[in-house]
Amino acid sequence: MITRQRLATGVCALLAALTAGIAYPAGAVADETAEQAAPKVDLVLDVSGSMRATDIDGKSRMAAAKQAFNEVLDATPEEVQLGIRTLGANYPGDDQKTGCKDTAQLYPVGPLDRTEAKTAVATLVPTGWTPIGPALLKAAEDLDGGNGSKRIVLISDGEDTCAPLDPCEVAREIAAKGIGLTIDTLGLVPNTKMREQLSCIAEATGGTYTSVEHTDELTDKVNQLVDRAADPVVVPQAVEGAEACAKAPTIESGLYTDREEFAQHRWYRVDVEPGQELRASVSVAADREVSPDYGVLLRAVTLSGREIVRGEAAGTGRTDVISTGLRYPKAESDDENAAAETVCLQVANSFSAAAGVKTTPGLPLELTVDVVDAPDQASDVASFGLGRGWWLLGALVLTGFLAGVLWGWISRLRVAVWRTN
């Protein structure tokens, strides 16, 4: 699952960069984050009837949530645009169809007026159903627009009551849109089924699940998540790979997100000038239960289909994200007018779905591409990975050889001395 890793969320991007041994130049990241819009956070609070239970520090779950919200609103950074959405707050009846539409925007996502937001929270009374799936869909709409980070923080004390709309599938659909939205979930006095559902929701988008049983824990965790939204991030750019290189989109240096179905191939094109080096890495995350034994392949191929270099990795179910990378230096040309080479990048996976698991949308994929000036002695560091380490290897071999010869001479001398005595 995603979170126990792109964690970045950071985790898929970070793993990808580390796998290929690359990172964005500091200036490039600074330029990109500087251009981002304000970060947005939508707090989604369960106000269903079960929130009346008095089992959190001697008070009701609703009272604990209100206290935590008030403290969070006081501590929200100025740059964060924050909103509040409720689920189960307005319909007290028994009609499921009506109850599953019961989600409302209590405070719109935007610049925070703390007094107004606190007044709105104070009006909440535990009421009805638990339509988590519908609330997540609406919360994603609340956060629409802008290229800053987007985060939903869902706080609930029970499972969704609006089947067959599975909130885990809803989270996967939201993630598949490639809008860079993360859902974090917090479970109040959790049980096993609720923990599994909230964990699945978080993992589908690279978020986190946390179990909380005390008011101060709830306050601290929500504050942490809101603060995290304000941290500068590189938001992946959505891209849709093609089934063949001829139809593939041309991409430049950057971080990209896509979806790849089980055992599917995705193709992308990158132009590499003479004297430049292509560095690419990919991470594919298992955001649902998959069969053990799987792999991911990243290939650089010419337009004619000749393989240039590849990177591959295999897993056995012990990790939630599998990553690999490659490097390809394009040699300098004596022709000053030499054209760029179009390199086809192919991403393939050998994941298979466990019994009863839906195969759509596809698995989350993050692709990191960096086209830079090739380093000196590029031929030494191409795809072998050892670079100047060949010199060290040669020195070790020579040292071993000389040591062997010396030991042989010493042994023969000792034998000769022993015989003469």
Image: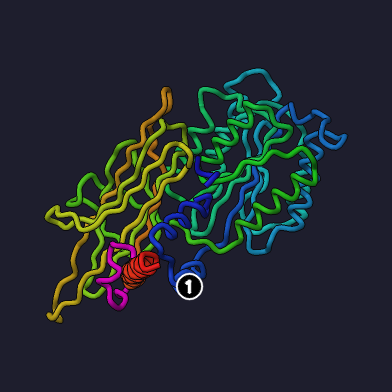
Residue at position x 24%, y 68% in the image: 272
Work out whether residue 100 can be spotted.
Answer: yes
Residue found at x 49% / y 51%: 6
Front residue of this view, candidates 89 and 274: 274
Question: What residue appears at the point 48 percent right and 33 percent down from the top-left corner?
Answer: 169
Q: Give the percent coordinates (x, y) of residue 259.
A: 37, 44
Asked whether, in this view, residue 143 is left or right of residue 393, the answer is right
Find residue 349 and report its horizontal and vertical position in percent.
Answer: 32, 41
Q: Position of residue 20 (x, y in %)?
A: 38, 60
Disc 1 marks which residue?
Answer: 26
Q: Quadrant of residue 403?
A: bottom left
| Residue that lies at the very extreme toward the front in this rendered image | 421
Amino acid type of the residue that numbered disc 1 sits on in the rendered structure: Ala
Mark 1 element type: helix
The question of residue 248 being in magenta is answered with no
What segment carries the magenta color? 372-386
Taking the view exactly as shown, the residue that stands out farthest to the right is 58
Q: Is residue 185 left or right of residue 278?
A: right
Prevailing secondary structure of the magenta residues: loop
Q: Residue 291: x, y in percent? A: 41, 30
Residue 141 appears in view: no
Front in this rendered view, residue 318 or 278: 318
Q: Is residue 51 above or below residue 258?
A: above
Residue found 50% across the figure and 52% down from its top: 11
Q: Answer whether residue 381 is magenta in the image.
A: yes
390 is higher (above) or lower (below) than 150? below
Say if 419 sits above or below 200 in the image: below
